[in-house]
Image (cartoon, rainbow, N blue to C red):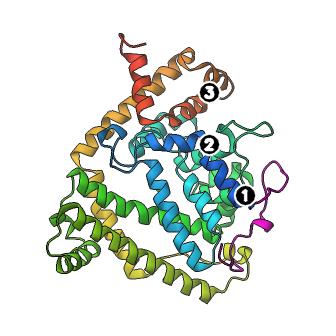
Amino acid sequence: MADLAVFAADPARSRGRRVPEPAPEGRTEYQRDRDRIVHSTAFRRLEYKTQVFVNHEGDLFRTRLTHSIEVAQIARSVARNLGLNEDLVEAISLAHDLGHTPFGHAGQEALNDCMRDHGGFEHNLQSLRVVDHLENRYGDFEGLNLTFETREGVLKHCSIRNAQQLGDVGERFLRREQPSLEAQLANIADELAYNNHDVDDGLRSGLLDLEALSEISLFRQHLDEVRARYPLIRDRRQVHETVRRMINVLVVDLTKTSRDRIAAAAPASIEAVRTAPPLVAFSEPMAEAQQELKRFLRVHLYQHYRVARMAAKSKRVVKELFDAFMADRRLLPPEFQQRAARMGARAVADYIAGMTDRYAIREHRRLFAIEDA
Ligand code: MG
């Protein structure tokens, strides 16, 4: 790893794990976090969870897993250029979506609705629940027992009410402080990754077309450049050449702007980062260009009638599963029956949130189709 800057997270000075453990051999604390995440069950499930397109709609669309890997790739390259801790940024990136329900945002909205009288459901908070409690693989502790720095990065946002109950990782929301630069970076890399891969997947699916996307300055500028430089290439190659240019200018802008902001604030330690304003950021014009793209995707892709139909179906599946389990806990697998006896609806939400898209569809069939068992 390149030399760490003074404002980077230093694994030797970590605020530690919830259950103290001997220091790892041959790797740092953050590498150990990353390794535990990669070996977790929740991480493997990301392969079969929707990003925008439901898993069975096509083999080439992003899933939560490939999305998380793209986030890690982008975040690591920026981290290396800024002297930040690449291992920590990778651990946060790979863990950031572990708490996502099946069926993407539709699934999360439905589950949040179901949980309205039981404390709600929020995927960020659920990601933290997964790494703190739900992964059960180690003899000495519940969850993955990750370092404070990885856990605070996973908890991107949370309400004041929830922050009050979360202990150490909730404190910064109460004090209105920033997390580490590594956490700030993973958060922005998430947005950068999905804006670009959703353009790619949107075009691949035929729900978006090049002409409509050309309304967006960030896209048009690069598409024009690609067409001028390669007049003969078409379709997927043209799209890829355009999207890769967009990612590149965004990454270059993010790196440069963040470097300047860090230089101006000159934080002498990670503690100084916490009380400074957010330092990892795009320049104003680039932030505006990203917003324009985001608004376009919302209207033309996320609200496209074909996406909306699938979302409506997905919500129905989640709601019907939830209602069935709440009406009769004996329908839950034994482990979750025990948990439901202790914690009620939260155990049902944990069970549903852990499902992959196809597991949820199968489970729904097992409960509602008379000929399936
Ligand atoms: Mg994400």
Q: Secondary structure at mark 3?
A: loop
Q: Secondary structure at mark 2?
A: loop
To which residue does mark 3 refer? Answer: 344
The answer to whether one can see residue 37 in this image is: yes
User: Residue type at mark 2?
Assistant: Ser
Kindly tell me whether residue 279 is visible in this rendering.
Answer: no
Rendering quarter of residue 249: bottom left
Judged by depth in the image, the label closer to the viewer, 2 or 1, is 2
**How far across and how far down the image is residue 106, in percent?**
38, 42
In the picture provided, is 288 more to the left or to the right than 23? left
Q: Position of residue 266 (x, y in %)?
A: 66, 86
Q: Which label sits on residue 148?
A: 1
Q: Quadrant of the N terminus?
A: bottom right
- In the rendered image, the vertical position of residue 293 relative to residue 156, given as above or below: below
Q: For the residue carrying disc 1, how many other residues have a C-alpha within 10 Å: few (<14), some (14-19), or many (20+)?
A: some
Q: Secondary structure at mark 1?
A: helix
Q: Which residue is mark 2?
A: 40
